[in-house]
Amino acid sequence: MYNQADMKYVDYHLHTHVSHDAVGTILEHARQAEKAGFSEICFTEHLDFYPSGDGLSCSTIPSEAQLERYLEECAMR
């Protein structure tokens, strides 16, 4: 039998503003997850980074600068 008090709340399928179907930064998601009581989260971005303004197309391969900005965002604490 499990003890509900010992349960961990996790979400292993989150996307940020770099994916075509999501909004919000890593930090915004992390803060919201903490408020909601999640103990772990994981970002699973789509390869189609950086959607166009109208959301109809994406830069399939991020530029080096885009990737560097994303990795810097990942390292924020």
Image: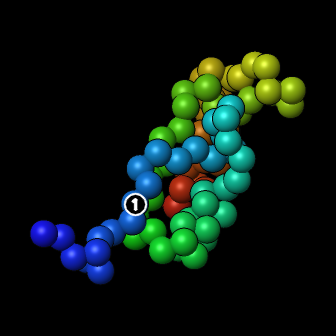
In the displayed structure image, the side of residue 57 where residue 12 appears, left or right:
left
Tell me: residue 69, above or below residue 56.
below
Where on the picture, by quarter, is residue 52?
A: top right
Is residue 11 visible in the rendered image? The answer is yes
Q: Specify few, some or many for label 1: CA neighbours under 10 Å numbering under 14, 14-19, or 20 or more.
A: few
Q: Which residue is mark 1?
A: 10
Residue furthest left in the image? 1
Q: Position of residue 50 (x, y in %)?
A: 71, 33
Residue furthest right in the image? 54
Image quarter of the C terminus: bottom right
Image quarter of the N terminus: bottom left
Q: Position of residue 46 (x, y in %)?
A: 55, 31
Residue furthest front in the image? 1
SS under mark 1 = strand
Pick whichever, 2 or 35, lies toward us: 2
Tell me: residue 13, above or below residue 11.
above
Where on the picture, by quarter, is residue 3?
A: bottom left
Q: Position of residue 22 (x, y in %)?
A: 67, 42
Where on the picture, by quarter, is residue 28?
A: bottom right
Q: Position of residue 26 (x, y in %)?
A: 60, 57
Residue pictured at 69% horizontal, 23% vertical: 59
Is residue 76 visible in the rendered image? The answer is no
